[in-house]
Amino acid sequence: MQGYLSIVLHAHLPFVRHPEHEKFLEESWLFEAITETYLPLLQIMENWRNDRIEAAITLSLSPTLCAMLIDPLLRARYERHLNGLIELADKEIHRTHWDRAYRELSWMYHHRLSLARETWRFYSGNLINAFKQFQEEGRLEIITTAATHGLLPLMSGHPQSVRAQILTARDHYRSCFGRDPRGIWLPECAYINGIENFLQEANIRWFILDTHGLLHANPRPRYGTFAPIFTPNGVAVFGRDFDSSRQVWSKHEGYPGDPRYRDFYRDIGFDLDFDYVKPHLPSPDNRGFTGLKYYRITGGQGPKEIYQRDHALKAASEHAAHFVAERVAQVKAAGAIIDRPPIIIAPYDAELFGHWWYEGPEFLDFVARNLANEQNVVSLLTPGEYLHRFPTNQIATPGGSSWGEEGYWRVWLNESNEWIYPHLQIAQERMTKLAKKFPKAKGLKARALKQAARELLLAQASDWPFILRAGTSPDYARRRVKDHLLRFIALHEQLTLTKIDEPWLVEIEARDNLFPDVDWNYWK
C-alpha cells in the first residue's frame, strides 16, 4: 500500500443515571446512541468479518459510557425502551395501512429495530464484551479518554486532577477490556504542554490533536499531518486531516447535508397525536424524539418530502466512493514528497454515524468495502499499528489547542459557563488535602473518600459547560454541576469536621455508582 487511512470514532456520553425516577429524559441520550450508532456499528463489523473484509478501525469508548453500558439498571431500561419502539413501529404499520410510502417506512423501522433487538440479545446486552471480541480479533482498536471527559487544559492549574482523570480512565479500561489502553482521545482534542507526562505514567503511547495543534508544533512537523510526531518524552501525536474532516463535518460542504438523507429533526413524536405517542416518549409529560422519522432533508424552504431509503443508500454509496477517491489522491500526492507511506487521520464523533446522520453506518460500510475491493493504494489502519510499522518519527512539542469554536477551548470557557471553574478549583485543592490526610483510610472513611472522588470527577465533565454554551439542556447541566459540587462539599465537611452520614452516603453511592475502585490517592 502507498498509504493508510485511519478512521477514529469517539463514542462518549456524560454519565446520566437516575434510579430515583421511573423514566428520565436525559437517559434517552444513551438509548438513542445504542439503537442508532453502537448496535449498527457492531452489525457492520459482523458483516465485515463474515465477508472477510480487512477493515480495522479505532473506537474510543469513554469511561462514563462504559460505566453506563455495563450498568444493570440502564441495560434493563434500554431493553424496555427498545421493546416500546418496536411496539410503536407495529402501531405505525397499522396506522399507515392505506398510505403505501409511509407504510413501507414503518415496516423498515420495524425490521431495523427488531434486528437491533436481535443483536442486543445475541450479546446478552453486554456491548462492552461485544466490542472487546472485535478488539481481540484485531479488527478494532479500542482507546480511552479522560475519566469523565474533563477538559484537561482547564485543570492545568491543579495537575493532580489531570493525573486523576487519566489514571482513573486507565484503571477502568483495564477492568473492562483486560489490558491497558495504547491510545487516548484527549477530551475535545484539547492539549496543553505537560499533559503527555501523565500519559507516559499511564503507559499510553499516542493521542490525536486537531490539525492546528500538530501544525503549530515546535519545531514545525516536516510531514504535516501525514505522519505522527513524538513529544520529547516519547508519546506520539497524530493530527486530524483537514480535508477528510471537512467532507463529513462541514455544515455547507459535508455529505450529511445531502437532501436525499433522512431529516433528523422531523419526528413523529412531534407530528402525531400526543396521546398516541405518549407511551413511547422519553419523557411522558413532554413531546420528544422517538426515532421514527418519515421525511428527508429536502433542502430549501419548501415542504418536506418523504424519505426514500433506496435513494439515501445510493447517496451514501456515491459519497463513500468520492471519499475514497479523495483519500487516494491525497496519498498519491503526499507519498510523492515524503519518505514513508502517509497516514490520513479521520476522527469523528461516533454518534454522528447513525444518530445524527442516519445513513452514516452504511457510509462507513461502503468506505471499508471500497478500500478493500476497488483499489490498491490506500488501506484502513489504526494509529497504534502505524506506530508499530513506523516507529521512528520526528520529535516536537505540539501547540496548545482543541477542536471546536476558534480552536482553543472557547466553547468550554466563556461567559455562559465561567462560573464553574472557581468552584472546581477549590474542590480540587480540597481533594488533594483529603488524599494527603487519609492516604490509607479504611471502612466507612474509605467509602466517603471514594465517593468524594466520584463527585469531583463528575463535576469536572466537559459536557456541562458545553451544554451551557450550546443552550440545549442548560437547566439540567447547571443542576448536575451544582449537585456534584454540593455532595463533594458535604463529604469534605463530614470527613474533616463532623462525622460521616452513612445512610446518606449509601444513597449517593447507589446513584453515582461509577468507578467502584477509584483511587483517591491519585490526587496526592
Image (cartoon, rainbow, N blue to C red):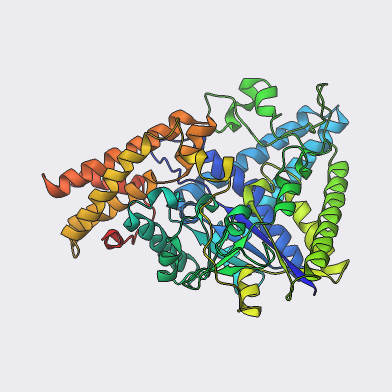
Frontmost residue, 382 versus 109:
382
Frontmost residue, 502 versus 238:
238
Residue 80 horizontal side relative to residue 301, left or right: left
Q: Is residue 401 visible?
A: yes
Q: Is residue 137 visible?
A: no
User: Measuring 63% from the left and 51% from the top, which residue is drawn there?
Assistant: 350
User: Measuring 42% from the left and 35% from the top, which residue is drawn there?
Assistant: 21
Residue 27 in percent (x, y) is at: 50, 40
In this picture, is 62 found above or below 507? below
Judged from this view, the residue extending furthest toward the left is: 498
In this picture, is 345 found above or below 116? below
Residue 306 in percent (x, y) is at: 83, 30
Frontmost residue, 122 versus 286:
286
Residue 239 in percent (x, y) is at: 62, 60
Residue 206 in percent (x, y) is at: 54, 67
Residue 2 horizontal side relative to residue 484, left or right: right
- Would you identify the image quadrant in which residue 365 lies? bottom right
Residue 397 horizontal side relative to residue 198, left or right: right
Q: Quadrant of the N terminus?
A: bottom right
Q: Quadrant of the C terminus?
A: bottom left
- Would you identify the image quadrant in which residue 223 lies? bottom right
User: Measuring 58% from the left and 48% from the top, which residue is drawn there?
Assistant: 403
